[in-house]
Image (cartoon, rainbow, N blue to C red):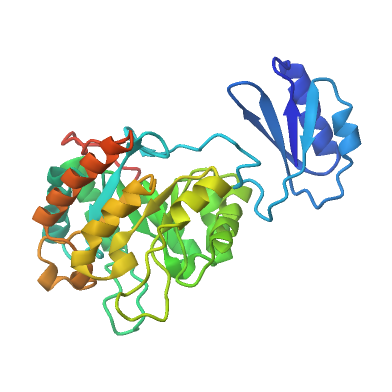
């Protein structure tokens, strides 16, 4: 439920509505807008006495949110949310950041070389997995905390903010000490305990769509994070499994405009996992940006043939350079721009 205040409602009138919502046993989330303030009622089970709220001074309208996801919906917040993971790197506005880097952190030399290549190509953020959920228990699982420490070194070397994955509750707190944005992978999209944890941590979250998840499933997972008070959520379309073995997954480009219609949260695309094949990454990245993606995340490895994971879908550094040049042209054509690459200025990490 949303309580919409009249234009020019006083702070006292807003505070009074917030107080009454609390007296009714619910949480109030004031959302100041350009024209007027709306107050969300959190925990609404459908039995709220809306007549009591409608009678309060300054209240102009009561809106019942019809979607099963509440705070994520456009009904709840008509304006698009902009999520900033580091100074100058924001998702959801006119600028489109490119996140690039290897699937896994393998060594100090490898991640620094990858970070420099990503920065030089024009990427605004660095991706790299310290914890790697793999289909096979015998595959490379990542370097763990050591990988996070190496990512921090790469950030100091290049100035690029870090996006890396957390796999469980304990790991989420550890990742939050090092990363600028916590990634929740496709396999954990419906790990509700983990979603609540990153919601409480409060750092920006990159939430990937599950391999067999509907768009509503994705939005409901995001709702878990917002319900804990964290509105800094970036959604990610990374492909869904189909019956066709021609590609690793099917990158669902229709999800991008669909999510924009259904939700105020930004959505980016991952054409690397969405196709699983290197020569498909560039055309699908271009298509995703043209469809309205608020960012692109791609895998790039300085030496893909030697990669410990996902080498077949990882771009070479020169391919990333060419891709970002092409993405700038696409962005210009649709009235947007690609976020400039990170500076070489050393930034202190959170650890």
Q: Residue furthest front?
A: 333
Q: Nearer the viewer, residue 152 or 61?
A: 61
User: Which of the 4 image quarters holds residue 330?
Assistant: top left
* Residue drawn at point x = 13 percent, y = 49 percent: 321
Nearer to me, 152 or 263? 263
- Where's residue 227, x and y in %? 63, 49
Where does residue 150 sit, x and y in percent of width and height?
22, 56
Q: Is residue 152 visible?
A: yes
Seen in the picture, residue 59 relative to 263 is either above or below; the reply is: above
Could you say where residue 338 lies in the image, as x and y percent from the top left?
A: 27, 38
Pick the front one: 190 or 169: 190
The quadrant in which residue 245 appears is: bottom left
Q: Is residue 4 left or right of residue 299?
A: right
Above/below status of 335 relative to 153: above
* Left or right: where 89 falls relative to 18: left
What is the x, y in percent for residue 316? 12, 60
Count every numbered label the image shows and give the total.
0
Q: Quadrant of the N terminus?
A: top right
x 71%, y 33%: residue: 39
Asked whether residue 338 is in view, the answer is no
Q: Is residue 167 left or right of residue 103?
A: right
255 or 339, which is in the foreground? 255
Q: Is residue 50 left or right of residue 311?
A: right
């Amino acid at each position: 439920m949303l309580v919409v205040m009249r234009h020019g409602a006083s702070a006292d009138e807003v505070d009074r509505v917030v107080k009454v919502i609390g007296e009714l046993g619910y949480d109030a989330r004031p959302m100041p807008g350009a024209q007027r303030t709306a107050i969300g009622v959190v925990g609404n089970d459908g039995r709220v006495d809306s007549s009591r709220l409608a009678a309060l001074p300054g209240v102009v309208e009561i809106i019942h949110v019809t979607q099963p996801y509440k705070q994520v919906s456009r009904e709840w917040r008509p304006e698009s949310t902009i999520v900033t993971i580091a100074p100058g790197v924001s998702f959801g506005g006119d600028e489109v950041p490119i996140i690039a880097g290897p699937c896994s952190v393998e060594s100090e030399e490898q991640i620094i070389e990858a970070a420099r290549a990503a920065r030089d190509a024009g990427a605004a953020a660095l991706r790299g997995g310290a914890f790697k959920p793999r289909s096979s228990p015998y595959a490379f699982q990542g370097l763990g905390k050591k990988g996070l420490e190496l990512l921090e070194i790469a950030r100091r070397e290049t100035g690029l903010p870090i996006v890396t994955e957390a796999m469980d509750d304990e790991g989420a707190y550890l990742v939050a000490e090092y990363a600028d944005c916590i990634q929740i992978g496709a396999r954990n999209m419906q790990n509700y305990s983990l979603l609540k944890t990153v919601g409480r941590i409060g750092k920006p979250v990159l939430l990937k769509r599950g391999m067999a998840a509907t768009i509503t499933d994705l939005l409901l997972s995001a709702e878990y994070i917002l319900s804990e008070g964290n509105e800094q959520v970036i959604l990610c379309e990374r492909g869904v499994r189909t019956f066709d073995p021609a590609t690793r997954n099917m990158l669902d480009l229709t999800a991008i405009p669909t999510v924009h219609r259904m939700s105020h949260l930004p959505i980016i695309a991952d054409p690397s996992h969405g196709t699983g094949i290197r020569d498909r990454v560039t055309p699908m990245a271009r298509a995703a940006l043209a469809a309205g993606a608020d960012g692109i995340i791609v895998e790039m490895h300085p030496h893909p043939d030697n990669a410990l994971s996902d080498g077949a879908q990882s771009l070479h550094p020169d391919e990333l350079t060419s891709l970002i040049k092409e993405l700038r042209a696409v962005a210009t054509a649709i009235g947007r721009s690609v976020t400039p690459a990170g500076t070489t200025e050393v930034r202190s990490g959170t650890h």
